[in-house]
Image (cartoon, helix red, strand yellow):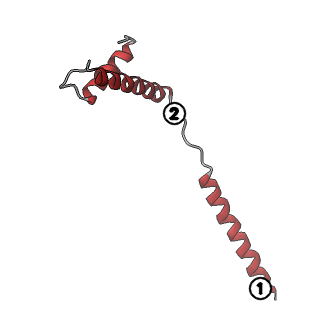
Amino acid sequence: MLNRSVSSVLAVAMALALAGTVQAAETKAKKETSAAQAAARERMSKCSLEWKEAKASGKAAKDMKWPKFWSECNKRLKEGVKA
């Protein structure tokens, strides 16, 4: 009888310990984005909109591809010059 009670208590304790470990892993906070990452994402969004507008209006050069446009636009936005 005593063996059965001790085994039950140990089983419950192990289950609770495992549940706590799983819950701690699930609630682990994500890293916050740095100011530089947020600025880069904002520049990419702005350049993406400019790219779509330029392609739709035909203002983009025919040989212009996104990587080249992104590079030029990113440099321009970093310098603070508007289109």
Query: Is 63 left or right of 53, judged from the image as shown?
Result: left
Circle 2 residues within 10 Å: few <14, some 14–19, many ≥20: few
Residue at the far front: name it: 57
In the picture of the structure, the residue carrying the numbered disc 2 is 33
- Above or below, 49 against 7 in this view is above
In the picture of the structure, the residue carrying the numbered disc 1 is 4
Quarter of the image where the C terminus is located: top left
Q: CA distance from mark 2 to mark 1?
A: 52 Å
Q: Residue 60 has which mark?
A: none
Residue at the far left: name it: 63
The amino acid pointed to by label 2 is Thr
Mark 2 or mark 1, which is nearer to you? 2
Query: Secondary structure under badge 2?
Result: loop
| Marks 2 and 1 in Cβ contact (< 8 Å) | no
Quarter of the image where the N terminus is located: bottom right
Looking at the rendering, which quadrant does residue 75 occupy? top left
Q: Earlier in the sequence, mark 2 or mark 1?
A: 1
Residue at the far top: name it: 81
- Above or below, 4 against 36 in this view is below
- Above or below, 29 against 46 in this view is below
Q: Residue at x 40, y 12 (%)?
A: 80
Q: Position of residue 55 (x, y in %)?
A: 29, 24
Query: Is 76 left or right of 10, judged from the image as shown?
Result: left
